[in-house]
Amino acid sequence: MSREPTDPPTVHDLHGPADLTEARSLIAAQQETIGAPVLDEAEQHRLDVAADGGVRAAGWSPVLARVGAQPVGYGAVLVGGGDPSVPGSGDLAPARDAVGLGQVLPALVDALAQRLPGAQVWMRHVDVAGGDLDGAVEAGARIDRQLAVLGRALDVSSDGHANRDAPDVPDGITIRASRRGEDDEGVVVVLAAAYEGTGDGGWTLERFLARQQLDFYDPADLLVAARNDGSLAGLHWLKRRDADTGEVYNLAVHPDAQGLRLGPALLTAGLDHLVAVGCREVILWVDRANERAVRLYETAGFATRWDDVALRLPA
Ligand SMILES: CC(C)(COP(=O)(O)OP(=O)(O)OC[C@H]1O[C@@H](n2cnc3c(N)ncnc32)[C@H](O)[C@@H]1OP(=O)(O)O)[C@@H](O)C(=O)NCCC(=O)NCCS
């Protein structure tokens, strides 16, 4: 349960390993409380390396908010990055169980905005409707991007399927597991066309081959919708997060095949695949602005678990 602090938080730059280790402990405790990561993987890595006495990332400014001696929130900004429209990116991880978010967030937003004005910082596991961000907005931050984290249980029916009312696969299309090498170019054609002009665009063969090197990649978990001529019309790429939980990592239909209900058919085939490998629940991240995709998932029984939000710091 939250309580209001007697004193306002003060925010300090983190220099030595002792400070950084204190920050790392706060993050670990928050992760335990929430049951999900509170930092981006790359940010967690920067913090771990620096806390272990390794080389600090260039242009990286980590801070810790404290009330008295008690750490109540972590934040960091990093100059530069892939997006030329923002001066840099970062993370905000206020403690949820120590003091009110309405106290900690303005202090962190002010401190990070002084270090890198206009940066885009991510805060995870947010209840936007519940007012979690009010303190940040009052401090001048605005919501840049909102990713909904949706989930549902995988109820296994007696015939071993997640969904008895599976939509039909359009004529001339077959859904099957992908084949490494053989399907690589077709997969990239679908991804590049489906996401062209969106914030998730820019797919190339090189990027796809790099993803194949990630630990979780298994061609059996990447389903493709193949046309009779061998070309691909869509895909459903799944990730097994742990033995119980699967993730809709990427669902995409080539624009030429959109509107045929291939998306729902691929979604159902993927959920059935997760059931077959023993998963009991599934989650996914979807941009709230992608109304078609959000509607598709809600129709398939997904509900909001939380939101991950990108805030633009005041300039
Ligand atoms: C989201 C996506 C997978 C849906 O696949 P799909 O096969 O087109 O799905 P559907 O045919 O069932 O269409 C879904 C809805 O979008 C509507 N729709 C289809 N084509 C449309 C178009 N060109 N413009 C606007 N709406 C369209 C459909 O009418 C349907 O609405 P309804 O559920 O109210 O009937 C597909 O549009 C896509 O690949 N989008 C780009 C990638 C993406 O955003 N993926 C999700 C990331 S999490």
Image (cartoon, rainbow, N blue to C red):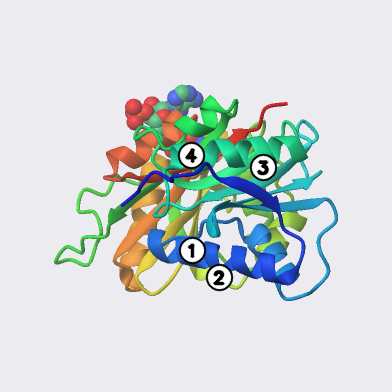
N-terminal label among 3 and 1: 3
N-terminal label among 1 and 4: 4
296 lies left or right of 161: right
* Rendering coords of residue 215 (x, y %): 60, 73
User: Which residue is labeled 3 in the image?
Assistant: 192
Please tell me in which quadrant of the rendered image residue 89 appears.
top right
* Rendering coords of residue 237 (x, y %): 51, 57
Q: Residue furthest left?
A: 158
Front-most of residues 19 and 67:
67
Residues marked 3 and 1 touching at CB (< 8 Å): no
* Rendering coords of residue 229 (x, y %): 57, 50
User: Which residue is labeled 4 in the image?
Assistant: 103
Query: Few, some or many C-alpha atoms within 10 Å of disc 2 (few <14, some 14-19, many ≥20)?
Result: some
Residue kind at label 4, given as amino acid type: Gln
The span from disc 3 to disc 1 (Cα, nearest Å) is: 20 Å
Front-most of residues 44 and 299:
44
Residue kind at label 3, given as amino acid type: Ala
Please tell me in which quadrant of the rendered image residue 131 appears.
top left
Up-down relation of residue 137 to residue 232 (above or below): above
Quadrant for ligand 1?
top left
N-terminal label among 3 and 2: 3
Q: Is disc 2's CB within 8 Å of ligand 1?
A: no
User: Which residue is labeled 2 in the image?
Assistant: 216
SS class of the residue under badge 3? helix
Front-most of residues 168 and 287:
287
N-terminal label among 4 and 3: 4
Q: Is disc 3's CB within 8 Å of ligand 1?
A: no
* Rendering coords of residue 53 (x, y %): 77, 75
